[in-house]
Image (tube, rainbow, N blue to C red):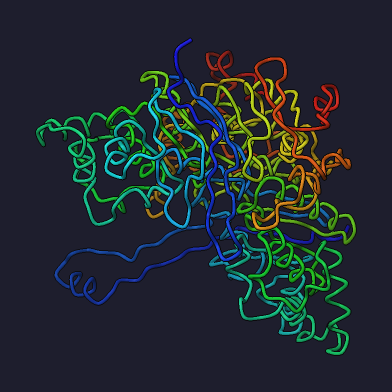
Amino acid sequence: MAIPVLDVDNLVVSFGTREGELTAVNGVTFQVHAGEVLGLVGESGSGKSVTGLAVMGLIDAPGRIASGSIKLLGEELVGRSERELRAIRGKRIAMIFQDPMTTLNPVLRIDTQMIEAIRAHESVSEKAARDRARQALAQVGIPSPEERLNAYPHQFSGGMRQRVAIATALLNRPAVLVADEPTTALDVTIQAQILAEVQTLAADHGTAMVWITHDLSVVAGLADRIAVMYSGRIVETGPVEGVLDAPIHPYTNGLIGSVPSRNRRGVPLAQIPGMAPSLARVPPGCPFNPRCARATATCRADMPGPTLYEGDRMARCHHPVPAPESAAA
Amino acid sequence: MTPPILTLETVSKRFVKPLDAAEKVANLFGAGLRAQVVRAVDDVNLTIAEGEVVGLVGESGCGKSTLGRVISGIMDPSEGRVLYRGADVARMGGKERRATDLAVQMIFQDPMASLNPRLRVIDIIGEAPVVHGLVEARDKEAYVAEIMGRVGLDASTRPRYPHQFSGGQRARIGIARALAVKPQVLVCDESTAALDVSIQAQVLNLFMKLRHELNLTYVFVSHDLGVVEHISDRVAVMYLGRIVELSPTDELFRAPNHPYTQALLDEVPRLVAKKRKFSSLKGEIPSPLDPPSGCHFHPRCPHAFARCKVDRPALKEIAPGRFSACHLNEEAPARPGRATADGAVLAS
């Protein structure tokens, strides 16, 4: 089997704070292959965005990658110098953020920014770079790209801005694209347009994608595999169909139950009580135990290790949800 | 028969940006500039029965939040009337108007922007009922504690400030503040949009529980169709200031009539683990400064024909309790060619 494009192994990211060293990402392991989309799902504070930033080499002090490895096509990225990382970022790994205005410089025209992104990594003429920028804009469905190159970011609507950010991220045909909630702020119709573009682009270029989101239903239609994070750990992972149809971890089951859907109109949603723990006060044992209906003394004492299940799946739980129950939930 | 709790009659809300001095001077030289007018809400009729949950959905800029504000009395309509239990809100005297304003309360999207960061929770929740004479000042503590219990907040946290609470708890504080003045109607403007799914589920369940306990009427403004589908009895779909479809929830989601509703429903990501092709409704919502003529939706509509560019379709009853503003409902039977393509939907 081909080596994965992105191979993250036992990644630990911690932040030094007044309350001591807090571990935001605690032993995360996943692989993404060419053309594959991994949905990284979790609630605020689960460590999903920090994982994305770590892959980009964008963890700044007081944060640090405490241990683990991140390999891009077999090449280790952890421990590289800032200079080496800069050559890789934007060239071989790119990222799209939730708010495109954090990517785009409001006082520079789009063409200036896109041409700079190309010429930072390749010595091509300005004209050739501009041509490529125009093609990239056309590819993400921006009408009359030639004129739009001369526009400033504020002259675009929210959806168009996000397209520009995506086009910029894809300029150098990166092997890996990390997308951190890029459609969360958009209307459903615009979200669907962008998901459609991204789907085609990933398939055409063979880009490996990590799609970070809190919205299970976006991932359901987009991803090949799904990884559910809770309190810094991946608690369940597997192919999308398997995980959504028959979740093993009670947290995944609860997340799915929390999504409003037409089948249960008027019936109270199967809510998860309480809220995610603060990193400074992670409960002992399984961090989900205070919110879990299935928790026992074992859960309060021991963190469950990864258990492999049929159908290429993994979950960390002492008391996995039996199949028929999860289907009914 | 008792009158409905809320009635909107041909309500419009316009926002006008008048010409500034330079533009007026330019006009003296024949520039022909005109004040910009946005019709945020355009000729809306809506009746809401007591105890009902009505969802208002649409994309950003469709006027749903403005309509919510008009309903809750925060903004007065530019045209048309808002009736509360059959009485025109604009013609009410001071005392009656105040009672109506208290009876219709709004819950906002961002609790951090709508809670005063320098007030303690006890004052945020307790101030209004004391000012309006609903409770004596000496009973405030007990009253606030009771309301906090009702929305699932620990009453011992009442001396705290908003920043000491999590997002879900702040949403509950916003709900408690609205409930403190004993409202009949709650207008919720994207009240769960900023929350994580598991917390959103808790807050939605709270809304449902309160509805049964207090016999509340809700107007639920949201862009999230899943949420609206879950909580509403009826749904109004808005596009550029107009209601284009109004139907009982089940029927709307089973067989949407208006092409815009159909497109909107197609785009909703579903929790079905199938790699799907996201289709796309072409283009974006046009600027409300310069809306398209006739049916506002015609430039994006796959079924548009000549009449759509000229005539504004009225919101007509197409089946008992179902309303849709689309010319296709009249033209379709005369066009047999269309029946095979979308007859199943149009015939509903």
Between B17 and A140, the one nearer to me in the picture: A140
Q: Is residue A105 above or below residue A311?
A: below
Q: Residue at x 64, y 52 (%)?
A: B195
Residue B57 image point, x, y percent: 61, 46
In the image, taking residue B84 as reference, residue A280 lies left or right, namely left
When asked about the image quadrant of residue A252, the answer is top right
Q: Residue at x 54, y 50 (%)?
A: A14
Q: Is residue A257 above or below residue A24?
A: above
Q: Is residue B233 visible?
A: no
Quadrant containing the C terminus of chain B is top right
Q: Residue lying at the far top in this picture: please name it.
A: A1
Q: Is residue B161 above or below residue A113?
A: below
Q: Is residue B16 above or below residue A15?
A: below
Residue B177 image point, x, y percent: 74, 71
Residue B327 image point, x, y percent: 54, 33
Between A121 and A198, the one nearer to me in the picture: A121
In the image, taking residue A184 as reference, residue B227 lies left or right, namely right
Quadrant containing the N terminus of chain B is bottom right
